[in-house]
Amino acid sequence: MKTEIPLTLPDWPVQNSGISKRVRAHLRKMPHPLPQKDEVAYIAPEDFQGTGMSRKKFLKTYGAVLGLVAGINSMGEAAFAENLFSSSGGRAAFASQTRVLDTRAAQQYAASTRLIPNKDAVPTYGIPSFNGKYKGEYLALAKAAALRHGIPQDLFLRLVQQESGWNPRARSHAGAIGLAQLMPFTARKLGVDPHNPAQNLEGGARYLRQQYDRFRSWKLALAAYNAGPEAVLKYSGVPPYKETRGYVRAILGS
């Protein structure tokens, strides 16, 4: 269960010039929270957009700079910065905390499966296994993106195989880009860089999940991914386009 806390600082990282430059420099390394309703702040680094993990929980879990934030709130920025670095003990504690933040904590945070948002259970029956020969570096990224968005992994791997053949530089005649063949407009709407393989896969998985949430069918979600949701709505099902029907059949096998 995620922890919610009201914002206690005007922004993140701290911009006020009264705080030590060294403290500010380390705070700027922290992930930026996404704005939420009722001014609740959540940690959401680029690779884990929308994880729902609160800033407070992140700091507490990894012992990074919880003391810094608490001290700033209780003492004021300038006073806290002066107090923190006025003794060798304070300087040592700060150095220890930031070392944890910059090394082990960052690795553990990035790898933690507990940060994956919960998705409604989705049916996986009838989806053929991925039997492609590709075993390269993007396979794990695609699996992780599928897991984050509650998509059957075999389905998403088959989609990437069909879209680009695992070529991160693939570009269609219509202008679609990368592994998941995102159109530039769609990528901008999703807030991802289509030229970055990890972000391209993240955007593709997120967009596919959006279509599933809309149509409640993987068959229709794939049709919408290929031809656009408007076409699925227009024909109340898979559009009668040869390309789209072949696309759905290639991925679902039916």
Image: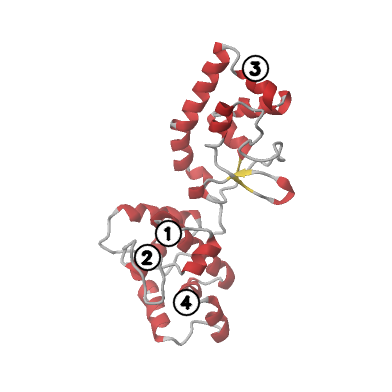
What residue sits right under mark 3 in the picture? 83
Residue 160's disc number: 2
Secondary element under disc 4, as helix, strand or loop, is helix
Residue 201's label in the rendered image is 1
Is residue 1 at all visible to an observer of this figure?
no
CA gap between label 4 and label 3 equals: 61 Å
Contact (CB < 8 A) between labels 2 and 1?
Answer: yes
Q: Is residue 148 left or right of residue 163?
A: right
Pinpoint residue 193: horizontal percent, then vertical percent: 46, 58
Which mark identifies residue 221?
none
Q: Earlier in the sequence, mark 3 or mark 2?
A: 3
Residue at mark 1 to residue at mark 4: CA–CA distance? 18 Å
Which amino acid lies under the numbered mark 3 shown in the image of this protein? Asn
Residue 181: give x, y in percent of width and height.
41, 68
* Location of residue 8 in the rendering, given as x and y in whole percent from the top left corner: 71, 36
Q: Earlier in the sequence, mark 2 or mark 1?
A: 2
Q: How is the image coloured?
A: secondary structure
Q: Earlier in the sequence, mark 2 or mark 4?
A: 2
- Label 3 Cα neighbours within 10 Å, binned few <14 / some 14-19 / many ≥20: some
Q: Are marks 4 and 3 in contact (CB under 8 Å)?
A: no
Q: Residues within 10 Å of mark 1 (few under 14, many from 20)?
A: many
Q: In the image shown, does 20 or 176 lie closer to the viewer?
A: 20
Q: Disc 2 versus disc 4: distance between alpha carbons? A: 14 Å
Q: Residue furthest left?
A: 133
Q: Kindly identify the residue that appears in the image at 56 percent across and 46 percent down.
A: 44
Residue 194 in the image, given as x and y percentages of width and height: 43, 61
Tell me the residue that label 4 is attached to.
Answer: 223
Question: What whole-number distance in Å separates the C-alpha atoms at marks 2 and 1?
Answer: 8 Å
Q: Is residue 147 above or below residue 66?
A: below
Looking at the image, can residue 228 be seen?
yes
Instruction: Give the label, 3 or 2, closer to the camera.
Output: 3
